[in-house]
Amino acid sequence: MKHVIVIGGGVAGLGAAYKVRRAAEEGHELSFTLIEKDSRLGGKIASEHVPDEWGGAEDDKFIVDGGPDCFLTEKPGVHRIAKLTGIFEDELPTDDSRKRTWILSRGRLHEMPDGVMMFAPTKFVPFATTGLFSWPGKLRMGMDLLIPRKERWPEGDTAAQHDETLESFVVRRMGRECLDRLAEPLVGGVHASDPAQMSLAATFPRLLDMEQKYGSMIGGFVDARKKVAEMRKKYPPKPGQKPRTFFTSFTEGMQVLPDTMARAAGIDNIRTGVKVTRIERSPEGWTVHLSDETRIEGDAVILATECWAAEPLMREIDPAIADALAAIPSSSSATVSLGFRAEEIGIDMEAFGVLCPLVEGRSLMAATYSSTKWPGRAPEGKVLMRGFVGGPHNQAIMENSDEQLVQIVLAEMRDILGVKGDPLFSRVYRWDGGMPQYTLGHLDRVKMIEERASDIEGLALAGGSYTGVGLPNCIESGERAVSKVLGEWGIALAEDSVEEKRLY
């Protein structure tokens, strides 16, 4: 029997473990051990149920997500796992009847104009009448329709061969104001990245492709909006079907996903609260040394950790891979969730949240009105909000204590949004080195890592440090890692022989 050792208990590692389990259920002689240094599984996914002790019913609770509170609906990875594990019906769409996003600009809140897709306006009237941009800024953004392509790619070239930073691209096509007031806060809330360093080909290759095909971002997104409208008209929702929204969560919080994956893979094969100190390769296979001075023997190792955690483990195995891992920077951030009485908060909660551009000089990167965006996140008569701090431009804020972070976020919410009342409770989640930065050269580094790892039998790397930070990307990276090692053993899975289809 072949034994696979998975290092890391986030959704990448759990995706790998669950695929090994499915392979075993197909009749292949396979087993796994998953090792997670923390006492809990889920990696950056962390949900907490806070009982309502402030006049609520016995079963009332707040559902707090400390890490990602959703996944991108259009990517099939999470939907597929949810289908396989029986939690698909527990998926939760956003309440788009209350959808509105505020952006702080020059000290004032402005609603995101209707029709903005990514960083481009696709409807004239909302764009022309918004106070988010100055008139010179609007005119400069409109120039995107006239500015020629930077270059014409030779036939067969891809975005990876014509990379540039997000800042370079947006300023070149749409102007500095678009970058500062729209693009930077949008990507900051998702990638916690610096646009001046961010590789466009590694994060948004679609934009580079769009420039080649349409000659402009506005033209490309106008066409995309038309196609979306046509698809919705052609395939209207079935009666009683849940609405399809851009983001999706789970009714009891995102922790449902890793917990379900762990049970499906097999809890008995998972060890938590112990750290891997060294991995060793020999002609017989692999030995993983643990912090409790025990060791595990296996035929393959899948490293499903952050790049900075994988780097020292790879140093003895392949120094070149370790050097490439060390060259992938990471930034730290924190989320601060606050519960309030609805009657005391003193603001209009009919919105999904607010984005705070870096040029505004605020400590708060963004805030989510969690109980508006997600039905059921707070009991009746209560509201839940979440603030984000940190990111590459404000790592110093992470030196504050949890109590200080709560006061910083609360003060920002009061000043920016007008929040009143005292919080019923607070929860702080820190993610030290939690967000990999896809800087220029990232795709070359990842290519080198994958090529060298392909020559090492029984080894694969997975996680958000390589080809996508979203939860579907991470799950699929773990599954690809398993396919790599099984392929080396001549094992082909039935699920790999059929093209995966969208299940949503």
Image (cartoon, rainbow, N blue to C red):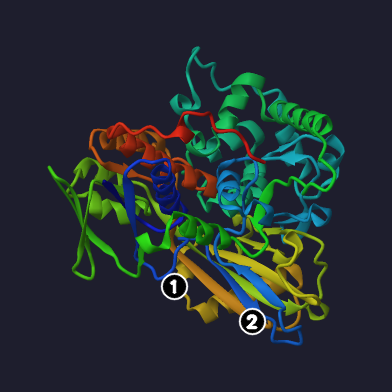
Q: Nearer the viewer, residue 273 or 171?
A: 273
Q: Residues within 10 Å of mark 2 (few under 14, many from 20)?
A: few
Q: Earlier in the sequence, mark 1 or mark 2?
A: 1
Q: Residue at x 78, y 34 (%)?
A: 122
Residue 360's place in the image compared with 406, above or below, is: above
| Whole-percent x, y for residue 172 in the image | 59, 32
Q: Residue at x 61, y 59 (%)?
A: 69
State the image quarter where residue 9 is shown: bottom left
Residue type, label 1: Glu
Q: Nearer the viewer, residue 270 or 71?
A: 270
Mark 1: secondary structure: helix
Nearest to viewer (mark 1 / mark 2): 2
The reply, left or right, for residue 30 in relation to residue 360 is left
Circle 2 sits on which residue?
A: 425
| Residue 142 is at least partly visible in this image | yes
Residue 201's place in the image compared with 262, above or below, is: above
The CA distance from mark 1 to mark 2 is: 22 Å
| Whole-percent x, y for residue 380 in the image | 80, 75
Q: Residues within 10 Å of mark 1 (few under 14, many from 20)?
A: few
The reply, left or right, for residue 147 in relation to residue 449 is right
Mark 2: secondary structure: strand
Residue 400's place in the image compared with 93, above or below, is: below
User: Mark 1 and 2 residues: CB-CB less than 8 Å, in contact?
Assistant: no
State the image quarter where residue 167 is shown: top right
| Whole-percent x, y for residue 209 in the image | 58, 25
Circle 1 sits on which residue?
A: 399
| Whole-percent x, y for residue 173 in the image | 63, 31
State the image quarter where residue 479 is shown: top left
Location of the C terminus by quadrant is top right
Residue type, label 2: Phe
Residue farthest to the top?
155
